[in-house]
Amino acid sequence: MEHLVLHFLTLDKNKKKFMIFQLQNYLQIFAILTYFVTHSNYKRLKKSYD
């Protein structure tokens, strides 16, 4: 029985780590996408003013 409890605790810790890791991945993707979108819009606006 103790073994099962330990197993569930380690599973829970691993799940939390994975969720945090996944969240960091989503944040990185969001940051990269927003960078490219704003950068491309900046280039387009700069061309229209030239």
Image: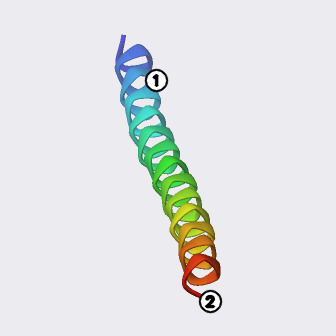
42 lies left or right of 50? left
Name the amino acid type tagged 2: Asp
In the picture shown, does residue 47 fall above or below 35? below
Cα distance, mark 1 to mark 2?
64 Å
Q: Position of residue 49 (x, y in %)?
A: 54, 84
Count residues near mark 1 (Cα–Cα under 10 Å), then give few for <14, some for 14-19, many for 20+: few
Name the amino acid type tagged 1: His
Location of the C terminus by quadrant is bottom right
Report the colour scheme. rainbow
Q: Residue furthest bottom?
A: 50
Count residues near mark 2 (Cα–Cα under 10 Å), then give few for <14, some for 14-19, many for 20+: few
- The reply to whether the C-beta atoms of the residues labelled 1 and 2 are less than 8 Å apart is no
Comparing 34 with 29, the one in front is: 34
Which element is circle 1 on?
A: helix
Residue at 61 percent of width and 66 percent of height: 36
Q: Position of residue 16 (x, y in %)?
A: 39, 39
Q: Position of residue 11 (x, y in %)?
A: 46, 27
Q: How many marks?
A: 2
Q: Which residue is mark 2?
A: 50
In the picture shown, does residue 17 fall above or below 11? below
Specify the quadrant of the image occupied by residue 44.
Answer: bottom right
Ranked by sequence position, the earlier of labels 1 and 2 is 1
Q: Which residue is mark 1?
A: 7
Residue at 50 percent of width and 61 percent of height: 34
